[in-house]
Amino acid sequence: MAKNLSTYRAVHVVSKGKLELAEKPLLDPPAGHVRIRVEACGVCHSDAITVDGLLPIQYPRVPGHEAVGKIDVIGPGVEGWRVGQRVGVGFLGGNCGYCEYCRDGDLVNCTNQAFTGVQHDGGCGEDPAADPAPARIVITTQLLLRASCAPAERRVTPP
Ligand SMILES: [Zn+2]
Ligand SMILES: [Zn+2]
């Protein structure tokens, strides 16, 4: 059977404690976002936040906040990133810039940040070997910058 190139398969949480395999729409990234073709995604204890609904969460939601892959689509207005760059995505979804913590330079404790796999879908999708429709996630470039946790000399930096 031919694959539908406008969808990808992912495991998503449909309600507290209930996971299902789903065919999800392959979304184009909105302004300020890129789409990543996921190559690997860790399974972490913090995924329990998504599965067990430990934070306010709108289901269905794809967990997976330890994803690595290559940018496959660049959204409008994105500068400094290119298709094909390998990037890593983490749990913290960027800071707001105006809360008390942000104003103190304590960005990791921002009270308004989103989390990958909680407010937006994470990287738990189909095995990349199942190309041409592997997992994709759409992510803000702010999140990419925060999540680049490779050693400084190996970090992917905007050109
Ligand atoms: Zn984790
Ligand atoms: Zn903040």
Image: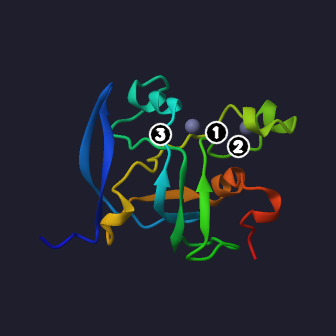
The three-letter amino acid code for the residue at tag 1 is: Gln
In the image, is the residue at mark 1 within 8 Å of ligand 2 by its beta carbon? yes
Tell whether 106 sits left or right of 132: right
Q: Relative to residue 58, is residue 82 drawn left or right?
A: right
- The tag on residue 83 is none
Q: Which mark is residue 113?
A: 1
Quadrant of ligand 1: it is: top right
Q: Secondary structure at mark 1?
A: loop
Residue at screen point 80% across, 30% down: 100
Mark 3 lies on residue: 43
Among the 4 quarters of the image, the one containing residue 150: bottom right
For label 3, the SS is loop
Q: Report the front residue among 100 and 155.
A: 155
Residue 124 drawn at (x, y percent)? 40, 48
Give x and y (percent) for residue 52: 40, 24
3 or 1: mark nearer the eye: 3
Q: Residues within 10 Å of mark 1 (few under 14, many from 20)?
A: some
Mark whose residue sits in front, 2 or 3: 3
